[in-house]
């Protein structure tokens, strides 16, 4: 059979995930544990007590046999059983206590991590969102934080408990009988070697399994998302052969490899346990015959061997958790450590009510990860109430100009001023509350139509909402919806057309009554009638405020007070429609071929 | 539970392996039960009789048994995992294939994310249950019966006493199982809400920022986050109760054995070794008993997973070839809609009502009308993506329901509004409909679609990987690859669903040229908003609310003065409003033929 290999991009990303213990990640995660240090120390104390109680178990058995049964002393037997009972109740209570404490701490930490991530996401610049897809953000906050849960809730203390258990058992065994202990430990080196070898093999296998899973995921996802194309081209049989013969087959083969190694481990450890038991029975038994130890000691010893091997098996299982936690933790920290590019200065003032004079003073801009200038020496003066149409090809820099105006980015050099105030000296909140923005692809939140309009101004009254909707011509179609303004626009629920969404987002912007309006005209198709309504809505929206429009429609451009033609990050022409046409420059050329993006 | 039993049917091909695995488990359990007996014998016979040779034999026996049980354990575990891996392989294949054949009506209502997680997560839950939980459960059951038997035969009284704590343990586990499922469900719901909030916030990040609503959003998120926290606490409270208690009940068993067993030894009814053996048996049950709560969890997950898996597998692919369906030979390309009505599942109104159209070979048909008027619904009936509710769609005079589906769809080419490409090379994407196409054919198709030039511009040319993890193509480039893809299949009937709405003017011109070539000698259906595309058609269908309200050629429809004229005038007016002040400068009055000035987004 030929060897199946997944595509390189799959294996590459899985190798990056293959993390061992990383002190930097551990340290970063510790930050979140710090507030609960007191609780954790307390839990640790409880664990020490619980472990001591657990380790004492076989000793009570020994006592019962030697002092009670063998000594024919029913009273002693009763007392020992009673003592054992009391110890076990203490163990029960403390165990309950520590599980509660740690699991609660774990949930607190996860809550904190999620909140910190969300709050950080609210501050990150928009260029972050160009690099990070929605799916990736959700995976970080939900799945990666989920891997922490397993670790913090169970693994941290399980590791401590196992280590303590091993140490405690060691001490108990040595105290009970030195020679027999040494005999048991004889298998230890083999055991350590087996464990290390196993870990190594398992780790390689799991990496392959993960690659297989993510390969399967992506092939599945594509086939489901593209199912209409699949059916249109009758590709089902071909795709099935690929899936079952390669992708799914690879998953099967890697799983079997991993399962083989995993199946091998437990029996080998058990075999070592059996070897140790056999040794103890022979040597210990001979010793009993020589009367140097009692039967109780021998029985207790056999019990201890069991308790000695169990934590080792458990630790080996926890190693997987540690590994995925390190990988998840690293990705969480990567997000949390992404620097916030636009932040309020410590002494930032509130932006005073805006009149609407805008000035770009020799503004240049490039992204932090790319030295190529996106905007180059932009000089622009806009009087209050003017409508500016930004015109140019895709990637010319139109969007960047309006993003600087809303201060989604700060200029690399030069400054953006509104009413003579440099935007960097005021708080973002006070600035943006006075600005409105309508995007090309109008985004609606899950909720009712009313809630979506209210997003512009949360405390607006019902009649204000309706007035805004009426002003942009949205009222009529809203009233025709099943529940009017209370109709919900949930995903998968009611589907509004692009044009209807556009009108709702207009109403939202109008309700906010911004002093400066930024509008990115939609390029997607709207039928002719809706288009007509949108045109008149636009007029209502632009009236009486400074507006920047990334324009695609001829009528918007020709009606503008100022047309700014942008190419390669520079303003190459600006002026009124008639003047620019007369100049027969770039605008004239663009005009001839149509104004599209 | 019903679903778990149903999924057991997937075990049938591996019945022999399952039987072998069970036999090994039986043998293993038997051996496990012998070990405490040996220890007992060592204590009672070896030690008391002072027989060194006996001790050597026992030690060797213990090690030998250890070796054999290690082998059996390995065999049993690997066999069950092997079976589980194969079952999940089969299940995933079934799911994958089944989903491919589910009709559009199904996918219209299904969320793709959910389908994916059913194929991966739910199948894995079943695999885990079959591979480790069932064997664990079997081991627990066998051990319990074995131990019960051994103990009862050794000493009835002590057996009953020492097994007393097992009763509350099993009761508790059962109770826990029913309760924890509900609590976990609540957690899942809460996490789903957090994820929704997050998704919305990230998708709408520009709006949130533009309206300075970060604090408001953070508050909303925190309340969802807090809900997850609370729901988890409920789960934790149960865990904190059950886990230590399970341990404790086992210890109580030991204490009971020591106390009552010890008294029996003192009374001479029992040996010391027997007490040790009793204790060892009890401890043997400790691990599986502790795992029992985990098993209950896994069982619940697997049952829920199986239910979701069967929901998919039980969905009928109702659009499929009939048994007696004829394979279509090469089509001429005549299409007829005969009294066609269409009502989608879960919708109250008809999307199409009594459509009657007959289209001749190699004709171009344009469909125009407001959003939701039924244009896409109509063309989707030709490749039989949906079945009519009434009437019939005929291709070359044959009802599409009576012909073999693949032979029909192979002769129909479709370019959708948003062209979806797959994460693969450009070559593979173009050859999607004909994986066996020769290199020259692929290049010829790319050239015809005006795509060859930009493809050659990439360093890897046709081997460039596109899609999510590869090179990002612009909308226009994607569209041209999609056109090449449709072209390569050399369809007799071509459907273009609003293929030009998301590209810029320059590209549009290139694509228009490619499309003109594509339409030659084929029956073509074009959905468009722009009149410049529409007016060239042999037949224009004007649709509104599921009806064809007008049909004819451009000139006929203008004369008729209906909806078409209205749309036409609106577009013209918008254009002319903008054009009024250009005339003195350019000096030539634009005519209808001059499409250069057509405002695209409004016409789109």
Image: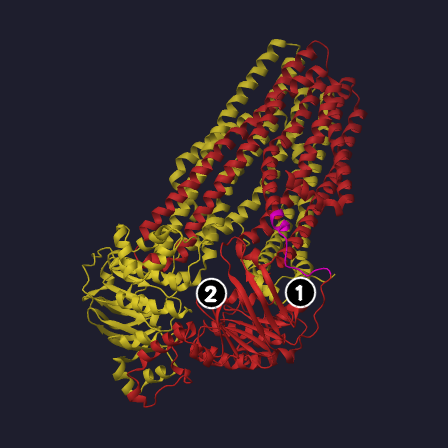
Horizontal and vertical percent position of residue B202: 40, 56
In this view, A448 is above or below A553: above
Give SS at disc 2: loop
List the single residue furthest toward the front: B560
Identify the disc placed on residue B373: 2
Frontmost residue, B45 versus A460? A460
Q: Where are the magenta residues, as a range?
A: B310-323
Q: Position of residue B249 (x, y in %)?
A: 58, 24
Of residue B350 and residue B232, the one placed in the foreground of this image is B350
Q: Could you give the CA–CA distance between mark 2 and mark 1, rounded to whole angstroms?
A: 27 Å
Which colour denotes chain A? yellow
How many neighbours does mark 1 have within 10 angstroms: few (below 14), some (14-19), or many (20 or more)?
Answer: many
Picture layout, residue B587 above or below residue A573: below
Of residues A481 and A501, the one drawn nearer to the viewer in this rendering: A481
Q: Which mark is residue A31?
A: none
Q: Which shade is chain B? A: red
Secondary structure at badge 1 equals helix
Name the magenta segment's main secondary structure: loop
The residue pinned by badge 1 equals: B405
Which circle's residue, 2 or 1, is located before the other in the chain?
Answer: 2
């Amino acid at each position: 059979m030929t060897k199946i290999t997944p595509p390189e991009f799959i294996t590459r990303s899985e190798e990056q995930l293959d993390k061992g213990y990383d002190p930097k990640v551990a340290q970063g995660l510790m930050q979140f544990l710090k507030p609960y240090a007191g609780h954790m120390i307390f839990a640790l104390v409880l664990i020490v007590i619980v472990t001591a109680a657990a380790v004492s178990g076989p000793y009570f058995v020994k006592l019962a046999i030697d002092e009670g049964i063998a000594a024919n002393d029913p009273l002693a037997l009763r007392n020992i059983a009673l003592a054992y009972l009391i110890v076990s109740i203490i163990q029960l209570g403390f165990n309950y206590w520590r599980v509660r404490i740690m699991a609660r701490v774990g949930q607190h930490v996860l809550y904190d991590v999620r909140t910190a991530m969300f709050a950080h996401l609210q501050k990150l610049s928009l260029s972050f969102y160009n690099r990070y897809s929605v799916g990736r953000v959700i995976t970080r906050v939900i799945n990666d934080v989920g891997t922490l849960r397993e670790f913090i809730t169970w693994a941290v203390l399980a590791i401590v408990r196992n280590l303590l258990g091993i140490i405690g058992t060691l001490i108990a065994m040595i105290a009970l009988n030195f020679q027999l202990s040494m005999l048991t430990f004889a298998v230890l080196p083999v055991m350590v070697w087996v464990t290390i070898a196993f870990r190594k093999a398992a780790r390689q296998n799991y990496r392959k399994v993960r690659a297989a899973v993510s390969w399967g995921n992506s092939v599945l996802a594509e086939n489901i998302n593209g199912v209409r194309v699949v059916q249109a081209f009758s590709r089902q049989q071909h795709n099935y052969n690929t899936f079952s013969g390669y992708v799914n087959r690879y998953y099967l083969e890697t799983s079997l490899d991993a399962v083989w190694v995993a199946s091998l481990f437990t029996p080998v450890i058990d075999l070592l346990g059996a070897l140790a038991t056999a040794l103890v029975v022979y040597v210990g038994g001979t010793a009993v015959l020589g009367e140097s130890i009692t039967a109780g000691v021998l029985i207790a010893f056999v019990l201890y061997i069991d308790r000695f091997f169990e934590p080792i098996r458990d630790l080996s299982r926890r190693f997987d958790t540690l590994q995925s936690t390190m990988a998840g933790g690293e990705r969480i920290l990567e997000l949390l450590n992404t620097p916030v590019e636009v932040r309020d200065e410590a002494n930032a003032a509130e932006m005073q009510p805006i009149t609407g004079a805008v000035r770009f003073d020799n503004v240049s801009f490039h992204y932090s990860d790319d030295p190529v200038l996106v905007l180059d020496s932009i000089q622009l003066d806009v009087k209050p109430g003017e409508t500016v149409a930004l015109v140019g090809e895709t990637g010319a820099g139109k969007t960047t100009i309006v993003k600087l105006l809303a201060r989604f980015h700060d200029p690399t050099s030069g400054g953006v001023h509104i009413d003579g105030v440099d935007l960097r000296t005021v708080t973002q909140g006070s600035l943006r509350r006075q600005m409105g923005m309508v995007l090309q692809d109008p985004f609606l939140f899950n909720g009712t139509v009313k809630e979506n309009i209210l997003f512009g101004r949360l405390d607006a009254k019902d009649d204000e909402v309706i007035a805004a909707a009426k002003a942009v011509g949205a009222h009529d179609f809203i009233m025709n919806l099943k529940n009017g303004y209370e109709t919900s626009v949930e995903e998968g629920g009611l589907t509004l057309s692009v044009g209807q969404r556009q009108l709702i987002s207009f109403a939202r912007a109008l309700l906010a009554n911004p002093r400066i309006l930024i509008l990115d005209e939609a390029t997607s198709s709207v039928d002719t009638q809706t288009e007509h309504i949108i045109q008149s809505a636009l007029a209502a929206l632009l009236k009486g405020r400074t507006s920047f429009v990334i324009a695609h429609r001829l009528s918007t451009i020709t009606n503008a007070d100022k047309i700014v033609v942008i190419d390669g990050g520079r303003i190459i022409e600006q002026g009124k429609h008639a003047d620019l046409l007369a100049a027969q420059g770039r605008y004239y050329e663009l005009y001839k071929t149509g104004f599209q993006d | 539970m019903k679903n778990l039993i149903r999924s057991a049917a997937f075990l049938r091909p591996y019945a022999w392996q399952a039987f072998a695995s069970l036999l090994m488990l039986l043998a293993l359990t038997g051996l496990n039960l012998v070990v405490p007996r040996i220890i007992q014998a060592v204590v009672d016979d070896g030690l008391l009789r002072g027989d060194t040779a006996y001790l050597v034999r026992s030690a060797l026996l213990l090690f030998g048994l250890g070796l054999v049980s290690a082998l059996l354990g390995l065999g049993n575990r690997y066999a069950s995992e092997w079976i589980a891996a194969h079952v999940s392989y089969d299940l995933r294949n079934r799911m994958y294939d089944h989903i491919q054949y589910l009709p559009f009506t199904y996918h219209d209502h299904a969320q793709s994310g959910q389908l994916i997680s059913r194929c991966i997560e739910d199948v894995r839950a079943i695999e885990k249950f079959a591979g480790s939980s069932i064997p664990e459960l079997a081991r627990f059951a066998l051990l319990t019966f074995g131990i019960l038997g051994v103990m009862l035969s050794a000493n009835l009284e002590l057996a009953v006493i020492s097994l007393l704590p097992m009763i509350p343990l099993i009761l508790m586990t059962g109770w826990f199982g029913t309760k924890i499922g509900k609590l976990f469900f609540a957690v899942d719901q809460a996490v789903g809400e957090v994820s929704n909030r997050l998704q919305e916030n990230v998708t709408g990040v520009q709006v949130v920022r533009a309206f300075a609503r970060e604090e408001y959003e953070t508050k909303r998120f925190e309340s969802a986050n807090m809900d997850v926290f609370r729901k988890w606490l409920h789960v934790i409270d149960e865990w904190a109760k059950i886990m230590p208690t399970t341990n404790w009940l086992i210890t109580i068993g030991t204490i009971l054995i020591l106390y009552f067993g010890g008294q029996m030894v003192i009374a001479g009814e029992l040996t010391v070794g027997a007490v040790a053996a009793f204790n060892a048996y009890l401890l043997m049950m400790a691990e599986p008993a502790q795992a029992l709560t985990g098993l209950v969890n896994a069982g619940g997950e697997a049952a829920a997973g199986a239910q979701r898996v069967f929901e998919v597998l039980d969905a009928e692919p109702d659009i499929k070839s009939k048994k007696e369906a004829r394979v279509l030979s090469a089509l001429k390309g005549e299409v007829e809609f005969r009294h066609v009505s269409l009502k989608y599942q879960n919708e109250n109104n008809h999307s199409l009502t009594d459509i009657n159209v007959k289209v001749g070979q190699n004709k171009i048909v344009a469909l125009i009308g407001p959003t939701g008027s039924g244009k896409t619904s109509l063309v989707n009936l030709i490749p039989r993506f949906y079945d009519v509710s009434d009437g019939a769609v005929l291709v070359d005079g044959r009802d599409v329901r009576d012909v073999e589906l693949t032979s029909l769809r192979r002769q129909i080419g479709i370019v959708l509004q948003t062209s979806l490409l797959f994460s693969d090379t450009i070559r593979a994407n173009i050859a999607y409909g004909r994986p066996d196409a020769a290199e020259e054919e692929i290049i010829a198709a790319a050239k015809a679609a005006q795509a060859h030039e930009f493809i050659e511009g990439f360093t890897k040319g046709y081997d460039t990987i596109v899609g999510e993890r590869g090179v990002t193509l612009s909308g226009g480039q994607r569209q041209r690859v999609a056109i090449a893809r449709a072209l390569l299949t050399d369809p007799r009937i071509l459907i273009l669903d609003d293929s030009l709405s998301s590209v810029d003017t320059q590209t549009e011109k290139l694509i228009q040229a490619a499309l003109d070539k594509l339409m030659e000698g084929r029956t073509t259906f074009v959905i468009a908003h722009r009149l410049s595309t529409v007016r060239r058609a042999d037949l224009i269908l004007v649709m509104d609310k599921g009806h064809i309200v007008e049909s004819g050629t451009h000139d006929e429809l203008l004369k008729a003065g209906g909806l078409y004229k209205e749309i036409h005038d609106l577009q013209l007016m918008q254009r002319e409003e903008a054009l009024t002040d250009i005339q003195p400068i350019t000096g030539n009055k634009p005519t209808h033929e001059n499409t250069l000035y057509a405002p695209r987004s409004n016409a789109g």
